[in-house]
Amino acid sequence: MPIRVYNSLTQKKELFKPIKKGKVGMYVCGITAYDSCHLGHARAAVAFDVIYRYLKYRGLDVTYVRNYTDIDDKIINRAKETNTPWNELTESYIREYQEDMEALNVLKPTKEPRATEHIKQMIQSIEALIKNKVAYESKGSVYYAVRQFKNYGKLSHKNIEELESGARIEIDETKKDPLDFALWKAAKPSEPSWDSPWGKGRPGWHIECSTMSTHYLKQPFDIHGGGRDLIFPHHENELAQAEGAAKKHFCNYFLHNGFININAEKMSKSLRNFKTIREVVAEHHPEVVRYFLIAAHYGSPIDYTQKNMADARAAVDRFYLLAGRLQSISDGKAVKVASPKDDLEKELAKSLKELPQKFEAAMDENFNTAQALGSIFETIRIFNKYLDGKPDLNSPFAKWAKGQWNKLQKDFCEVLGVFGLEASFYFKQIKQVKVSSQGLEQDWIEKKIEERRQARLSKDFKRGDTIRDELSKMGVELKDRPDGTTEWHLR
RNA sequence: GGCGCGGUACCCAAGCGGUUAAGGGAGCAGUUUGCAAAACUGUCAUGCGGCGGUUCGAAUCCGCCCCGCGCCUCCA
Protein backbone atom coordinates (compact mmCIF):
# COMPACT_ATOMS: atom_id res chain seq x y z
CA MET A 1 0.00 0.00 0.00
CA PRO A 2 1.30 3.42 -0.87
CA ILE A 3 1.63 6.16 1.73
CA ARG A 4 -0.31 9.34 1.11
CA VAL A 5 0.37 12.64 2.84
CA TYR A 6 -1.32 16.01 2.99
CA ASN A 7 1.09 18.50 1.48
CA SER A 8 0.71 22.12 2.59
CA LEU A 9 2.49 23.19 -0.57
CA THR A 10 -0.19 21.85 -2.91
CA GLN A 11 -2.96 21.78 -0.29
CA LYS A 12 -3.78 18.28 -1.40
CA LYS A 13 -3.26 14.76 -0.27
CA GLU A 14 -0.60 13.21 -2.45
CA LEU A 15 1.16 9.94 -2.99
CA PHE A 16 4.38 9.97 -1.02
CA LYS A 17 7.30 9.27 -3.34
CA PRO A 18 10.78 9.57 -1.89
CA ILE A 19 13.37 11.20 -4.11
CA LYS A 20 15.71 8.26 -3.66
CA LYS A 21 14.02 4.91 -3.57
CA GLY A 22 13.95 3.49 -0.07
CA LYS A 23 15.40 6.62 1.53
CA VAL A 24 13.74 9.59 3.17
CA GLY A 25 15.20 12.92 4.22
CA MET A 26 13.08 14.73 6.79
CA TYR A 27 13.68 18.04 8.51
CA VAL A 28 11.54 19.34 11.35
CA CYS A 29 11.86 22.72 13.01
CA GLY A 30 12.78 22.17 16.62
CA ILE A 31 12.82 24.77 19.34
CA THR A 32 14.31 28.13 19.99
CA ALA A 33 16.00 27.45 23.30
CA TYR A 34 15.04 30.41 25.49
CA ASP A 35 12.30 29.01 27.73
CA SER A 36 10.69 25.81 29.00
CA CYS A 37 8.79 23.90 26.37
CA HIS A 38 5.04 23.67 26.45
CA LEU A 39 2.51 21.14 25.25
CA GLY A 40 2.53 22.61 21.78
CA HIS A 41 6.18 21.72 21.38
CA ALA A 42 5.32 18.24 22.63
CA ARG A 43 2.61 17.89 20.05
CA ALA A 44 4.93 18.81 17.18
CA ALA A 45 7.67 16.53 18.48
CA VAL A 46 5.31 13.60 18.98
CA ALA A 47 3.54 14.10 15.64
CA PHE A 48 6.77 13.92 13.69
CA ASP A 49 8.15 11.23 15.95
CA VAL A 50 5.24 9.02 14.92
CA ILE A 51 5.83 9.87 11.26
CA TYR A 52 9.51 9.07 11.65
CA ARG A 53 8.72 5.81 13.39
CA TYR A 54 6.14 4.77 10.83
CA LEU A 55 8.38 5.47 7.85
CA LYS A 56 11.04 3.34 9.47
CA TYR A 57 8.48 0.64 10.25
CA ARG A 58 7.65 0.60 6.56
CA GLY A 59 11.26 -0.19 5.84
CA LEU A 60 12.42 3.21 4.70
CA ASP A 61 15.86 4.47 5.60
CA VAL A 62 15.02 7.80 7.21
CA THR A 63 17.44 10.58 7.97
CA TYR A 64 15.60 12.74 10.45
CA VAL A 65 17.06 16.14 11.29
CA ARG A 66 15.59 18.35 14.00
CA ASN A 67 17.40 21.53 14.83
CA TYR A 68 18.00 23.72 17.84
CA THR A 69 17.89 27.42 17.22
CA ASP A 70 20.39 28.60 19.80
CA ILE A 71 20.96 32.17 18.71
CA ASP A 72 18.16 34.65 18.23
CA ASP A 73 16.67 37.89 19.58
CA LYS A 74 14.54 36.13 22.16
CA ILE A 75 17.56 34.32 23.53
CA ILE A 76 19.56 37.52 23.76
CA ASN A 77 16.71 39.30 25.52
CA ARG A 78 16.10 36.50 27.95
CA ALA A 79 19.79 36.26 28.73
CA LYS A 80 19.82 39.97 29.57
CA GLU A 81 16.68 39.73 31.70
CA THR A 82 17.95 36.81 33.71
CA ASN A 83 21.54 37.95 33.75
CA THR A 84 22.70 34.63 32.35
CA PRO A 85 25.29 34.13 29.64
CA TRP A 86 23.28 33.41 26.49
CA ASN A 87 25.04 30.13 25.76
CA GLU A 88 24.40 28.82 29.28
CA LEU A 89 20.76 29.70 28.84
CA THR A 90 20.42 27.78 25.58
CA GLU A 91 22.40 24.87 26.96
CA SER A 92 20.10 24.45 29.93
CA TYR A 93 16.90 24.70 27.89
CA ILE A 94 18.18 22.24 25.33
CA ARG A 95 18.93 19.80 28.13
CA GLU A 96 15.47 20.35 29.57
CA TYR A 97 13.90 19.72 26.18
CA GLN A 98 15.81 16.48 25.81
CA GLU A 99 14.55 15.34 29.20
CA ASP A 100 11.00 16.22 28.19
CA MET A 101 11.37 14.28 24.96
CA GLU A 102 12.63 11.26 26.83
CA ALA A 103 9.67 11.39 29.19
CA LEU A 104 7.32 11.38 26.21
CA ASN A 105 9.16 8.52 24.56
CA VAL A 106 10.21 10.64 21.58
CA LEU A 107 13.06 9.02 19.69
CA LYS A 108 16.25 10.93 19.11
CA PRO A 109 16.41 12.21 15.54
CA THR A 110 19.32 11.12 13.37
CA LYS A 111 20.88 14.58 13.75
CA GLU A 112 20.17 17.46 16.10
CA PRO A 113 22.25 20.31 14.72
CA ARG A 114 22.55 23.70 16.38
CA ALA A 115 22.49 27.00 14.57
CA THR A 116 25.69 28.29 16.18
CA GLU A 117 27.61 25.30 14.87
CA HIS A 118 26.74 26.21 11.27
CA ILE A 119 27.55 29.90 11.05
CA LYS A 120 30.06 29.25 8.29
CA GLN A 121 27.51 27.44 6.11
CA MET A 122 24.96 30.18 6.72
CA ILE A 123 27.41 32.81 5.57
CA GLN A 124 27.98 30.80 2.42
CA SER A 125 24.21 30.63 1.83
CA ILE A 126 23.91 34.37 2.28
CA GLU A 127 26.79 35.01 -0.11
CA ALA A 128 25.08 32.88 -2.70
CA LEU A 129 21.87 34.86 -2.25
CA ILE A 130 23.72 38.14 -2.72
CA LYS A 131 25.41 36.76 -5.80
CA ASN A 132 22.02 35.73 -7.19
CA LYS A 133 20.74 39.25 -6.52
CA VAL A 134 17.98 38.23 -4.17
CA ALA A 135 19.75 39.69 -1.16
CA TYR A 136 21.56 42.94 -0.41
CA GLU A 137 23.79 44.32 2.28
CA SER A 138 22.77 47.40 4.19
CA LYS A 139 24.64 48.94 7.13
CA GLY A 140 26.32 45.71 8.12
CA SER A 141 23.14 43.68 7.84
CA VAL A 142 21.95 41.58 4.94
CA TYR A 143 18.34 41.38 3.81
CA TYR A 144 16.44 39.12 1.53
CA ALA A 145 14.82 41.04 -1.33
CA VAL A 146 11.44 39.40 -1.32
CA ARG A 147 10.32 40.96 -4.61
CA GLN A 148 13.28 39.47 -6.42
CA PHE A 149 12.04 35.95 -5.75
CA LYS A 150 9.16 35.30 -8.08
CA ASN A 151 7.78 32.33 -6.14
CA TYR A 152 7.49 34.22 -2.88
CA GLY A 153 4.23 33.14 -1.24
CA LYS A 154 3.90 29.80 -2.91
CA LEU A 155 3.81 27.85 0.33
CA SER A 156 1.61 30.13 2.40
CA HIS A 157 -0.48 30.98 -0.67
CA LYS A 158 -0.14 34.67 -0.14
CA ASN A 159 0.75 37.31 -2.63
CA ILE A 160 3.14 40.12 -2.04
CA GLU A 161 0.69 42.91 -2.74
CA GLU A 162 -1.68 41.68 -0.08
CA LEU A 163 1.09 41.21 2.41
CA GLU A 164 2.18 44.74 1.68
CA SER A 165 -1.29 46.13 2.31
CA GLY A 166 -1.48 44.20 5.56
CA ALA A 167 1.30 46.58 6.63
CA ARG A 168 1.72 45.68 10.24
CA ILE A 169 5.40 45.51 9.68
CA GLU A 170 7.58 48.16 11.24
CA ILE A 171 9.14 50.64 8.88
CA ASP A 172 12.85 50.08 8.85
CA GLU A 173 14.99 52.44 6.82
CA THR A 174 17.77 49.95 6.32
CA LYS A 175 15.44 47.76 4.28
CA LYS A 176 14.50 48.48 0.70
CA ASP A 177 11.07 46.98 1.15
CA PRO A 178 9.18 46.50 4.40
CA LEU A 179 8.64 42.83 3.58
CA ASP A 180 12.36 42.13 3.23
CA PHE A 181 13.64 40.06 6.13
CA ALA A 182 17.05 39.80 7.76
CA LEU A 183 19.52 37.11 6.79
CA TRP A 184 22.33 38.61 8.81
CA LYS A 185 21.99 41.13 11.60
CA ALA A 186 24.79 43.57 12.39
CA ALA A 187 25.85 43.17 15.99
CA LYS A 188 25.07 45.78 18.59
CA PRO A 189 27.72 46.26 21.26
CA SER A 190 27.76 43.49 23.89
CA GLU A 191 25.71 41.13 21.76
CA PRO A 192 27.07 37.74 20.77
CA SER A 193 28.53 37.94 17.30
CA TRP A 194 30.52 36.18 14.63
CA ASP A 195 32.82 37.54 11.95
CA SER A 196 31.39 37.80 8.47
CA PRO A 197 32.11 39.56 5.16
CA TRP A 198 29.69 42.27 6.37
CA GLY A 199 31.29 42.76 9.76
CA LYS A 200 30.43 41.32 13.12
CA GLY A 201 26.91 40.01 13.43
CA ARG A 202 24.64 37.03 13.79
CA PRO A 203 22.26 35.11 11.59
CA GLY A 204 18.62 36.11 11.24
CA TRP A 205 15.79 33.74 12.01
CA HIS A 206 15.03 31.35 9.08
CA ILE A 207 18.50 31.10 7.57
CA GLU A 208 19.63 28.47 10.09
CA CYS A 209 16.89 26.09 9.01
CA SER A 210 17.28 26.38 5.26
CA THR A 211 21.05 26.07 5.65
CA MET A 212 21.10 23.12 8.01
CA SER A 213 18.35 21.20 6.23
CA THR A 214 20.08 21.43 2.87
CA HIS A 215 23.46 20.84 4.48
CA TYR A 216 22.45 17.52 6.01
CA LEU A 217 19.83 16.33 3.55
CA LYS A 218 20.96 17.88 0.28
CA GLN A 219 18.58 19.82 -1.89
CA PRO A 220 15.88 18.91 -2.66
CA PHE A 221 14.83 16.67 0.22
CA ASP A 222 11.58 14.90 0.98
CA ILE A 223 9.76 16.17 4.04
CA HIS A 224 9.81 19.43 5.92
CA GLY A 225 7.69 19.67 9.04
CA GLY A 226 6.66 21.89 11.90
CA GLY A 227 3.69 23.57 13.52
CA ARG A 228 1.06 25.26 11.39
CA ASP A 229 2.14 28.64 12.63
CA LEU A 230 5.49 28.18 10.96
CA ILE A 231 4.03 28.17 7.46
CA PHE A 232 4.32 31.92 7.38
CA PRO A 233 6.74 33.48 7.60
CA HIS A 234 9.27 30.86 8.73
CA HIS A 235 8.86 28.12 6.13
CA GLU A 236 7.97 30.55 3.38
CA ASN A 237 11.22 32.36 4.03
CA GLU A 238 13.23 29.18 4.28
CA LEU A 239 11.89 28.17 0.90
CA ALA A 240 12.77 31.54 -0.58
CA GLN A 241 16.28 31.29 0.85
CA ALA A 242 17.00 27.74 -0.22
CA GLU A 243 15.59 28.13 -3.70
CA GLY A 244 17.05 31.60 -4.12
CA ALA A 245 20.53 30.38 -3.21
CA ALA A 246 20.67 27.01 -4.99
CA LYS A 247 18.22 27.82 -7.78
CA LYS A 248 16.55 24.49 -7.37
CA HIS A 249 13.64 22.94 -5.58
CA PHE A 250 13.79 23.08 -1.78
CA CYS A 251 11.59 20.30 -0.53
CA ASN A 252 8.77 18.12 -1.88
CA TYR A 253 6.34 17.75 1.01
CA PHE A 254 5.55 20.25 3.72
CA LEU A 255 3.70 18.71 6.66
CA HIS A 256 2.22 20.80 9.46
CA ASN A 257 0.73 19.84 12.77
CA GLY A 258 -2.29 21.52 14.35
CA PHE A 259 -2.42 23.53 17.56
CA ILE A 260 -3.25 22.75 21.11
CA ASN A 261 -5.95 24.75 22.80
CA ILE A 262 -6.48 24.91 26.53
CA ASN A 263 -10.14 24.74 27.42
CA ALA A 264 -11.02 25.77 23.88
CA GLU A 265 -8.80 28.81 24.10
CA LYS A 266 -5.63 29.32 22.16
CA MET A 267 -2.64 28.48 24.26
CA SER A 268 -0.47 31.54 24.46
CA LYS A 269 1.93 33.28 26.73
CA SER A 270 -0.08 36.48 26.82
CA LEU A 271 -3.19 34.61 28.00
CA ARG A 272 -1.01 32.90 30.57
CA ASN A 273 -2.73 29.62 29.86
CA PHE A 274 0.16 27.64 28.47
CA LYS A 275 1.17 24.38 30.05
CA THR A 276 4.77 23.26 30.12
CA ILE A 277 5.53 19.67 29.33
CA ARG A 278 6.83 19.06 32.83
CA GLU A 279 3.68 20.44 34.43
CA VAL A 280 1.53 18.14 32.35
CA VAL A 281 3.70 15.10 32.92
CA ALA A 282 3.62 15.70 36.68
CA GLU A 283 -0.16 15.51 36.56
CA HIS A 284 -0.67 12.77 34.01
CA HIS A 285 1.22 9.62 33.17
CA PRO A 286 3.49 10.40 30.19
CA GLU A 287 1.95 7.55 28.25
CA VAL A 288 -1.46 9.13 28.76
CA VAL A 289 -0.11 12.46 27.58
CA ARG A 290 1.33 10.84 24.49
CA TYR A 291 -1.92 8.99 23.85
CA PHE A 292 -3.82 12.26 24.15
CA LEU A 293 -1.52 13.78 21.54
CA ILE A 294 -2.05 10.99 19.01
CA ALA A 295 -5.73 10.29 19.67
CA ALA A 296 -6.69 12.88 17.06
CA HIS A 297 -5.14 13.35 13.65
CA TYR A 298 -1.91 15.36 13.79
CA GLY A 299 -3.27 18.09 11.55
CA SER A 300 -6.34 18.93 13.65
CA PRO A 301 -6.44 21.21 16.62
CA ILE A 302 -6.87 19.48 19.98
CA ASP A 303 -8.15 20.74 23.26
CA TYR A 304 -6.30 20.15 26.52
CA THR A 305 -8.96 19.74 29.20
CA GLN A 306 -9.16 17.57 32.28
CA LYS A 307 -12.05 15.72 30.66
CA ASN A 308 -10.04 14.92 27.57
CA MET A 309 -7.09 13.80 29.68
CA ALA A 310 -9.37 11.57 31.74
CA ASP A 311 -10.76 10.09 28.52
CA ALA A 312 -7.24 9.45 27.28
CA ARG A 313 -6.32 7.75 30.51
CA ALA A 314 -9.42 5.55 30.39
CA ALA A 315 -8.46 4.44 26.90
CA VAL A 316 -4.88 3.61 27.86
CA ASP A 317 -6.17 1.77 30.94
CA ARG A 318 -8.42 -0.25 28.68
CA PHE A 319 -5.44 -1.34 26.65
CA TYR A 320 -3.42 -2.40 29.68
CA LEU A 321 -6.37 -4.10 31.35
CA LEU A 322 -6.48 -6.55 28.48
CA ALA A 323 -2.73 -7.01 28.72
CA GLY A 324 -3.22 -7.82 32.38
CA ARG A 325 -5.95 -10.34 31.62
CA LEU A 326 -3.71 -12.07 29.12
CA GLN A 327 -1.18 -12.88 31.81
CA SER A 328 -3.40 -15.75 32.88
CA ILE A 329 -2.68 -17.45 29.57
CA SER A 330 0.52 -19.43 29.78
CA ASP A 331 3.10 -18.60 27.16
CA GLY A 332 3.97 -22.21 26.55
CA LYS A 333 5.61 -23.13 23.31
CA ALA A 334 5.06 -20.79 20.45
CA VAL A 335 2.17 -22.09 18.45
CA LYS A 336 2.43 -21.14 14.81
CA VAL A 337 -1.13 -21.70 13.73
CA ALA A 338 -4.18 -22.68 15.65
CA SER A 339 -7.46 -23.32 13.96
CA PRO A 340 -10.42 -21.61 15.59
CA LYS A 341 -13.29 -23.84 16.68
CA ASP A 342 -16.28 -21.87 17.91
CA ASP A 343 -17.66 -18.48 16.90
CA LEU A 344 -15.72 -16.57 19.55
CA GLU A 345 -12.46 -18.08 18.38
CA LYS A 346 -13.30 -17.46 14.76
CA GLU A 347 -14.14 -13.83 15.41
CA LEU A 348 -10.95 -13.30 17.37
CA ALA A 349 -8.77 -15.08 14.82
CA LYS A 350 -10.24 -12.95 12.05
CA SER A 351 -9.78 -9.75 14.00
CA LEU A 352 -6.19 -10.56 14.90
CA LYS A 353 -5.42 -11.39 11.32
CA GLU A 354 -6.99 -8.22 9.93
CA LEU A 355 -5.65 -5.83 12.51
CA PRO A 356 -2.17 -5.30 11.04
CA GLN A 357 -3.69 -4.54 7.65
CA LYS A 358 -6.18 -2.10 9.14
CA PHE A 359 -3.46 -0.48 11.20
CA GLU A 360 -1.21 0.01 8.20
CA ALA A 361 -4.02 1.20 5.97
CA ALA A 362 -4.82 3.88 8.54
CA MET A 363 -1.22 4.96 8.95
CA ASP A 364 -0.66 4.98 5.21
CA GLU A 365 -3.44 7.50 4.90
CA ASN A 366 -1.60 10.58 6.10
CA PHE A 367 -0.52 8.93 9.36
CA ASN A 368 -4.03 8.61 10.71
CA THR A 369 -3.27 7.57 14.27
CA ALA A 370 -6.86 8.11 15.36
CA GLN A 371 -8.11 5.53 12.94
CA ALA A 372 -5.26 3.16 13.73
CA LEU A 373 -6.14 3.32 17.43
CA GLY A 374 -9.76 2.65 16.54
CA SER A 375 -8.84 -0.66 14.92
CA ILE A 376 -6.73 -1.63 17.92
CA PHE A 377 -9.62 -1.05 20.31
CA GLU A 378 -11.97 -2.97 18.07
CA THR A 379 -9.76 -6.03 18.48
CA ILE A 380 -9.50 -5.41 22.21
CA ARG A 381 -13.25 -5.63 22.51
CA ILE A 382 -13.30 -8.92 20.61
CA PHE A 383 -10.46 -10.33 22.70
CA ASN A 384 -12.29 -9.45 25.90
CA LYS A 385 -15.43 -11.09 24.58
CA TYR A 386 -13.45 -14.23 23.86
CA LEU A 387 -11.98 -14.22 27.38
CA ASP A 388 -15.44 -13.69 28.89
CA GLY A 389 -16.49 -16.94 27.25
CA LYS A 390 -14.23 -18.68 29.79
CA PRO A 391 -12.08 -20.46 27.22
CA ASP A 392 -9.48 -23.08 28.06
CA LEU A 393 -6.50 -20.87 28.75
CA ASN A 394 -4.08 -23.67 28.04
CA SER A 395 -5.49 -24.46 24.64
CA PRO A 396 -3.26 -24.06 21.60
CA PHE A 397 -5.66 -21.42 20.33
CA ALA A 398 -5.41 -19.33 23.48
CA LYS A 399 -1.64 -19.49 23.33
CA TRP A 400 -1.62 -18.64 19.68
CA ALA A 401 -3.95 -15.67 20.20
CA LYS A 402 -1.83 -14.35 23.04
CA GLY A 403 1.29 -14.75 20.94
CA GLN A 404 -0.28 -12.87 18.05
CA TRP A 405 -1.43 -10.08 20.31
CA ASN A 406 1.99 -9.72 21.92
CA LYS A 407 3.59 -9.43 18.54
CA LEU A 408 1.10 -6.76 17.49
CA GLN A 409 1.59 -4.90 20.74
CA LYS A 410 5.28 -4.73 19.98
CA ASP A 411 4.59 -3.27 16.53
CA PHE A 412 2.14 -0.69 17.87
CA CYS A 413 4.63 0.39 20.45
CA GLU A 414 7.33 0.68 17.83
CA VAL A 415 5.17 2.99 15.71
CA LEU A 416 3.00 4.89 18.17
CA GLY A 417 5.38 4.96 21.12
CA VAL A 418 2.65 3.88 23.54
CA PHE A 419 1.52 0.49 24.88
CA GLY A 420 5.06 -0.74 25.45
CA LEU A 421 4.95 -1.15 29.22
CA GLU A 422 4.29 -4.11 31.45
CA ALA A 423 0.64 -3.79 32.50
CA SER A 424 1.31 -4.01 36.22
CA PHE A 425 4.10 -1.46 35.92
CA TYR A 426 1.80 0.95 34.09
CA PHE A 427 -0.90 0.72 36.77
CA LYS A 428 1.66 1.14 39.51
CA GLN A 429 2.95 4.31 37.88
CA ILE A 430 -0.55 5.61 37.29
CA LYS A 431 -1.24 5.23 40.98
CA GLN A 432 1.94 7.06 41.92
CA VAL A 433 1.25 9.95 39.57
CA LYS A 434 -2.29 10.31 40.87
CA VAL A 435 -1.46 9.98 44.54
CA SER A 436 1.19 12.65 44.43
CA SER A 437 -0.69 15.03 42.15
CA GLN A 438 -3.75 14.87 44.42
CA GLY A 439 -1.73 15.44 47.56
CA LEU A 440 -2.67 12.12 49.15
CA GLU A 441 -0.52 9.76 51.14
CA GLN A 442 -0.27 6.12 50.39
CA ASP A 443 0.34 5.03 54.01
CA TRP A 444 -2.75 6.79 55.26
CA ILE A 445 -4.91 5.19 52.57
CA GLU A 446 -3.59 1.77 53.42
CA LYS A 447 -4.23 2.30 57.14
CA LYS A 448 -7.85 3.10 56.33
CA ILE A 449 -8.14 -0.02 54.26
CA GLU A 450 -6.82 -2.15 57.11
CA GLU A 451 -9.38 -0.55 59.44
CA ARG A 452 -12.10 -1.46 56.99
CA ARG A 453 -10.82 -5.02 56.73
CA GLN A 454 -11.07 -5.46 60.50
CA ALA A 455 -14.59 -4.06 60.49
CA ARG A 456 -15.66 -6.41 57.73
CA LEU A 457 -14.11 -9.39 59.50
CA SER A 458 -16.34 -8.68 62.47
CA LYS A 459 -19.30 -8.31 60.05
CA ASP A 460 -19.55 -4.60 60.81
CA PHE A 461 -20.47 -3.77 57.22
CA LYS A 462 -21.86 -0.38 58.15
CA ARG A 463 -18.49 0.75 59.49
CA GLY A 464 -16.80 -0.79 56.46
CA ASP A 465 -19.05 1.05 54.05
CA THR A 466 -18.48 4.33 55.87
CA ILE A 467 -14.75 3.98 55.33
CA ARG A 468 -15.26 3.06 51.72
CA ASP A 469 -17.46 6.13 51.17
CA GLU A 470 -14.93 8.33 52.91
CA LEU A 471 -12.16 7.12 50.65
CA SER A 472 -14.41 7.27 47.63
CA LYS A 473 -15.02 10.96 48.21
CA MET A 474 -11.29 11.49 47.94
CA GLY A 475 -11.21 9.59 44.71
CA VAL A 476 -9.89 6.34 46.14
CA GLU A 477 -11.80 3.35 44.90
CA LEU A 478 -11.63 -0.04 46.54
CA LYS A 479 -11.86 -3.44 45.00
CA ASP A 480 -12.46 -6.42 47.26
CA ARG A 481 -10.93 -9.62 46.07
CA PRO A 482 -12.18 -13.13 46.79
CA ASP A 483 -9.24 -13.86 49.09
CA GLY A 484 -10.26 -11.04 51.44
CA THR A 485 -7.62 -8.55 50.40
CA THR A 486 -8.51 -5.18 48.96
CA GLU A 487 -6.98 -3.45 45.99
CA TRP A 488 -7.29 0.27 45.60
CA HIS A 489 -6.82 2.78 42.87
CA LEU A 490 -7.57 6.38 42.19
CA ARG A 491 -10.37 7.54 40.00
C1' G B 1 -9.85 42.81 4.25
C1' G B 2 -6.61 38.46 2.28
C1' C B 3 -5.36 33.21 2.89
C1' G B 4 -6.46 28.58 5.21
C1' C B 5 -8.92 24.85 8.47
C1' G B 6 -13.20 22.84 10.56
C1' G B 7 -18.82 21.96 11.93
C1' U B 8 -20.32 13.79 12.44
C1' A B 9 -24.54 10.91 18.76
C1' C B 10 -24.52 13.87 25.58
C1' C B 11 -18.67 14.78 25.19
C1' C B 12 -13.99 13.57 22.37
C1' A B 13 -13.10 11.65 17.50
C1' A B 14 -12.39 8.56 12.56
C1' G B 15 -14.66 8.63 7.80
C1' C B 16 -11.36 11.11 1.39
C1' G B 17 -18.10 8.47 -4.00
C1' G B 18 -20.68 2.37 -2.96
C1' U B 19 -21.94 -3.53 2.22
C1' U B 20 -25.26 -2.41 8.80
C1' A B 21 -21.59 5.87 9.73
C1' A B 22 -14.77 3.22 13.41
C1' G B 23 -13.04 3.86 18.27
C1' G B 24 -12.81 6.10 23.40
C1' G B 25 -15.58 8.48 27.44
C1' A B 26 -20.44 9.32 29.81
C1' G B 27 -25.51 7.16 30.25
C1' C B 28 -28.61 2.85 30.41
C1' A B 29 -29.18 -2.74 30.78
C1' G B 30 -26.89 -7.45 31.89
C1' U B 31 -22.74 -10.69 34.07
C1' U B 32 -20.10 -10.38 38.75
C1' U B 33 -20.67 -8.78 44.11
C1' G B 34 -22.50 -8.98 51.55
C1' C B 35 -23.81 -4.18 49.30
C1' A B 36 -20.60 -1.77 46.12
C1' A B 37 -16.66 -0.40 43.10
C1' A B 38 -13.73 -2.02 39.24
C1' A B 39 -13.83 -5.16 35.10
C1' C B 40 -16.34 -7.38 30.89
C1' U B 41 -20.49 -7.62 27.38
C1' G B 42 -24.68 -5.40 25.13
C1' U B 43 -27.09 -0.86 23.91
C1' C B 44 -26.73 4.23 22.29
C1' A B 45 -26.56 9.00 15.00
C1' U B 46 -32.28 6.15 9.02
C1' G B 47 -28.34 10.62 10.85
C1' C B 48 -23.35 13.64 9.32
C1' G B 49 -24.43 22.80 10.36
C1' G B 50 -28.55 24.60 6.54
C1' C B 51 -30.42 24.83 1.48
C1' G B 52 -29.81 23.53 -3.45
C1' G B 53 -26.97 20.76 -7.39
C1' U B 54 -23.91 16.63 -9.81
C1' U B 55 -24.44 11.11 -9.65
C1' C B 56 -27.56 4.81 -10.43
C1' G B 57 -25.51 6.15 -5.54
C1' A B 58 -22.85 11.80 -1.23
C1' A B 59 -21.09 12.71 5.59
C1' U B 60 -17.74 12.27 1.40
C1' C B 61 -17.78 16.13 -5.05
C1' C B 62 -19.82 21.38 -6.62
C1' G B 63 -22.46 26.17 -5.38
C1' C B 64 -24.62 29.47 -1.89
C1' C B 65 -25.65 30.53 3.25
C1' C B 66 -24.98 30.10 8.79
C1' C B 67 -21.48 29.15 12.82
C1' G B 68 -16.55 28.26 15.16
C1' C B 69 -11.15 28.56 14.72
C1' G B 70 -6.17 29.68 12.89
C1' C B 71 -2.51 32.52 10.04
C1' C B 72 -1.39 37.39 7.80
C1' U B 73 3.53 40.27 13.92
C1' C B 74 7.57 36.31 17.86
C1' C B 75 5.10 31.55 18.21
C1' A B 76 4.97 24.08 17.68
Image (cartoon, coloured by chain):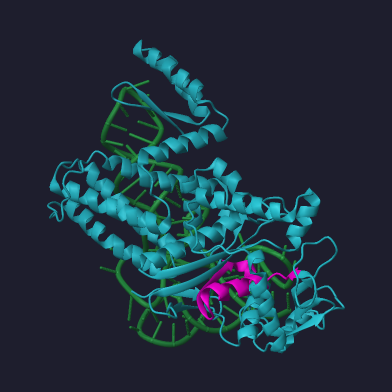
**In x, y percent, where is residue A213?**
57, 73
In terms of depth relative to the viewer, which is nearer, A436 or A139? A139
Q: Residue furthest top?
A: A458
Does residue A254 appear left or right of residue A427 in this picture? right
Picture residue at 55% right of the left edge, 49% below the top:
A99
The stretch of residues the image draws in magenta is A202-231
Picture residue at 56% right of the left edge, 79% below the top:
A9
Q: Colour of chain A?
A: cyan
In terms of depth relative to the viewer, which is nearer, B22 or A240? A240
Q: Is residue A180 visible?
A: no
**In this view, A15 is above or below A95:** below
Q: Is residue A98 visible?
A: yes
In terms of depth relative to the viewer, which is nearer, A468 or A258? A258
Q: Which chain is green?
A: B
**In this view, A326 is above or below A404:** above
**In x, y percent, where is residue A206?**
67, 72
